[in-house]
Image (tube, rainbow, N blue to C red):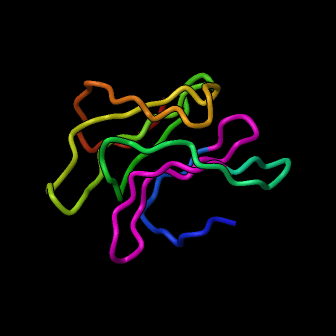
């Protein structure tokens, strides 16, 4: 079970893993990414983004990469950036920031 309740997160399915990206619990904005193996229902930490994000868009590319785009945090009005990770890498590998502008469109690849 996901230990922290969160809203306004990104949610994507890559293979048999469900990823929860960022989010907000009413007080805190989260940078964390967690995954749930849908076969075992076991949750794992998958690293943290550079940015704390809620209202984040998330998508999967080629079943091996997830991306988090845009969003909002307490210190900026809107986040203009994308961060991504290879889901096959080690469990403690942080999500790597990418230098890409974000324009508020949905995340669809």
Left or right of residue 108, residue 64 in this image: right
Q: Indicate whether residue 27 is drawn in magenta.
A: yes
Residue 16: give x, y in percent of width and height: 76, 40
Within the image, what quadrant is residue 14 found in? top right
Q: Nearer the viewer, residue 93 or 24?
A: 93
Q: Position of residue 4 (x, y in %)?
A: 54, 70
Write the start and end of the magenta stretch as one range.
Answer: 13-35
Residue 1 location (% of width, % of height): 70, 66
Please name whichever residue, 109 or 63, is drawn nearer the observer in this view of the structure. 63
- Residue located farthest toward the bottom when viewing the structure as drawn: 26
Q: Is 91 displayed left or right of 8 in the figure?
A: right
For the point 38% across and 51% down, which residue is it? 56
User: Closer to the camera, 98 or 60?
Assistant: 98
Residue located 55% across and 33% down the image: 60
Q: Is residue 90 above or below residue 24?
A: above
Residue lying at 75% horizontally and 47% vertically, measured from the top left = 37
Q: Residue at x 59, y 47 (%)?
A: 19
């Amino acid at each position: 079970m996901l230990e922290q309740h969160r809203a306004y997160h990104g949610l994507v399915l890559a293979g048999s893993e469900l990823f929860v990206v960022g989010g907000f619990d009413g007080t805190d904005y989260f940078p964390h990414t967690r995954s749930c193996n849908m076969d075992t229902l076991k949750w794992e930490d998958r690293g943290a983004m550079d940015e704390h994000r809620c209202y984040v868009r998330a998508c999967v590319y080629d079943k091996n990469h997830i991306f988090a785009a845009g969003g909002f945090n307490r210190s900026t009005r809107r986040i203009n950036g994308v961060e991504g990770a290879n889901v096959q890498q080690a469990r403690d590998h942080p999500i790597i920031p990418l230098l890409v502008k974000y324009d508020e469109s949905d995340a669809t690849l």
